[in-house]
Image (cartoon, rainbow, N blue to C red):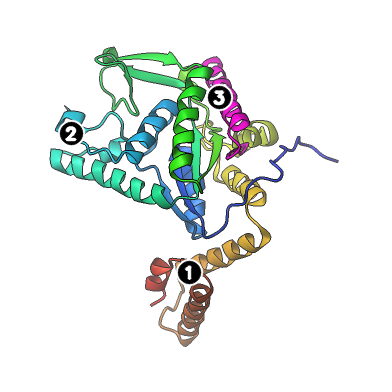
Amino acid sequence: MEFRTRTELPAGEAEIRHADRLLLWGSCFTESIGERLAAAKFRCLQNPFGVLYNPLSIATALQQVEQRKVYTSDDLFYDRGLWGSRMHHSSFSAADREECLRKVNDGIAAGAAFLDKADWLVLTFGTAWVYEWKADGSVVGNCHKLPERLFSRRLLRVEEIACSWQSLLEELRTAHPQLHVLFTVSPIRHTKDGLHGNQLSKATLLLAVDRLCTSLPFCHYFPSYEILLDELRDYRFYADDMFHPSRQAVDYIWECFSATYFSEATRRLVGECQEVRRAAEHRPFYPESEAHQQFKARQRQHIARLKESYPYLDFREEEQRLQ
């Protein structure tokens, strides 16, 4: 008997190869998938601006990376002892203005260098609700707990998202002909918008993404939202806050992602990379024993064989642990 409705995964999608470079942007769900990609030794870069949630902020950040924008003091604000950028996550803020600028501009430079060679742009939209800076009407990436009176809040329209992204993606594809785009909508519920407001937001995102994927053949959609909301559908698959997916749920979504976009050969290599990582993280009771020294020697040999076959693999962290 079948006690759940299985999500229909995309068939015949473009393949993500292990040697591909993946640039990931968007909500904190992006980081959940990005962590698993990095652990499997894919070459990926996550969120050069930090976590961003709405489509227009992500589009603006991506444009600034493509244009290699250089931030100056005029692009920052100062509040409660910290310098920050309204386009960036608070992790880029700093007590020293020059330090903040360094972090912001280093992130843009790293993103631009990676985008030049990227094979995949993975975009996770979290919400269609945006906050606009009243002084100039710009959509911000982060409010940084500044006074609410400085912002106005509104729900984006489907056409607004689709039009802004269609022109941006066409420009990117022209500049980077190898680039494929993978959209997903975050399954994390934004309950501060209210449950009805969250549903309106997710529906707006889904409609906009569907329009883009229909009109641009290099764009694809992965149903992470549907997997959690329709297939798992149970609070045991949520974290303690009842909003974010549990680790078990993210692991299942990762399995679905792997089955959709990885070839059998890629899945085997992912398994080998994960095996090396687990071996390097192993903490023995007797680290100086001959048995453990032999174990480490075998793992170093395994790494050497993998690097010989796949020269792009980076096992520096594991090699250091196995010394």
Q: Quadrant of the N terminus?
A: top right
Q: Quadrant of the C terminus?
A: bottom left
Q: Position of residue 108 (x, y in %)?
A: 30, 43
The answer to whether residue 117 is above or below residue 170 is below
**Residue drawn at (43%, 66%), measured in percent from left and top?**
314
Region in magenta: 194-223
Q: What amino acid type is highlighted by mark number 1?
A: His
**Residue drawn at (33%, 28%), measured in percent from left and top?**
142
Q: Residue furthest bottom?
A: 290
Earlier sequence position, callout 3 versus callout 2: 2
**Residue drawn at (34%, 18%), measured in percent from left and top?**
132
The residue to which callout 2 is attached is 82
Q: Is residue 229 left or right of residue 241?
A: right
Q: Position of residue 220 (x, y in %)?
A: 60, 38
Q: What amino acid type is highlighted by mark number 2?
A: Leu
Which is nearer the eye, 286 or 181?
Answer: 181
The residue to which callout 3 is attached is 208
Q: Residue furthest front?
A: 174
Q: Which mark is residue 282?
A: 1
Earlier sequence position, callout 1 versus callout 2: 2
Secondary structure, mark 2, is: strand
Q: Position of residue 82 (x, y in %)?
A: 18, 33
Is residue 96 among the parts visible in the rendering? no
Secondary structure, mark 1, is: loop
As measured in the structure, the alpha-carbon distance from the residue carrying label 1 to the one carrying label 3 is: 45 Å
Q: Is residue 299 left or right of residue 45?
A: right
